[in-house]
Image (spheres, coloured by chain):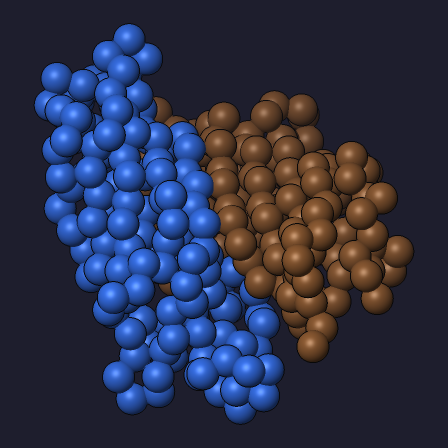
Amino acid sequence: MSHGVLSTSDVAVGEELPSLTIHISRDSLVRYTGASLDRNRIHWDERFATSVGLPDVIAHGMFTMGSAINVVSDWVGDAGRVVEYGTRFTKPVVVPYESGADVEVTGVVTALDAETRRATVELRAMCGTDKVLGRATAVVVLD
Amino acid sequence: MAVNTGFTGRTYPPTAPYSVGRAKIREFAEAVGADDRVHTDQALARSRGYRDVIASPTFAILIAQQCDRQLIEDPEAGIDFSRVVHGEQRFVHHRPITAGDEIVGVLTVDSVKQVGGHAMVTTRSELSTDKGEPVCTATSTIVIRGGE
């Protein structure tokens, strides 16, 4: 069946996925707050965030995680093919009012099993020099 | 109040079913910039073999955090939510979450550890349909920062 999903024969270990820049503004965080129902004020209320010792409003770790996986979904051709996805949240993404923040996401294929048609992708998400996701790994089922 | 390490191994009763709706799937996908039309276009989703539109890969957090709330709001657990930081998250999808699903979650506390001045709590939410079909296993580690 062909609807643009990658086949195992199209994929090789070491292959780099097309990268993605996620621009995060306060608007992005308010929308994610509503969609996810994670209404913690550190993600949208600067005065509150600084009162609990943060430098400024920070992005939801789950916003970064949820956005970064688009690199994999777009590459494989169907978001429903992502069967495993995990990460550590190593550094917060600080989102200033004026400039927002940019997170650069890249991915590389680290394992491929032709029998189960599964590929493992390691993701890297950088905000400036900070690695914001640690050990971010996704497994996809190919055609 | 210290985090209660005696909670390791505790399992909570199943949550009330969460009804997965097309509008919420779309709203969540838009919020994370997931522009695969499988989240919004029923005909396209069906052409890929799904019953209806499917959720983006981290949508399950909505339901998993509903499960986690049972622990966080349990006064005996001793968790101060204002000191909670998300440390780690993992999803294993047994099949995509699909519009029309009624999802029930069973929360288990896998571990509670005291590390230095902080506490680390790992929970597992087993999400399945109300008919008992496994959908997703969501594992989450939160860090509760110690007081100054």
**Residue A137 quadrant:** top left
Chain represented in blue: A
Chain represented in brown: B
Query: Which residue is depicted at the point 13% across and 39% down?
Result: A16
Tell me if residue A97 comes above or below residue A94 in the rendering.
below
Query: Which residue is depicted at the point 66% across and 43% down?
Result: B123
Total marks shown come to: 0
Front in this rendered view, residue B62 or A101: A101
**Residue B135 quadrant:** top right
Query: Which residue is depicted at the point 64% across and 38% down?
Result: B124
Q: Is residue A59 visible?
A: yes
Residue A11 position, x and y percent, is 14, 25
Front in this rendered view, residue A37 or A55: A55
Front in this rendered view, residue B119 or B48: B119
**Quadrant occupied by the N terminus of chain B:** bottom right
Residue B148 position, x and y percent, is 69, 77
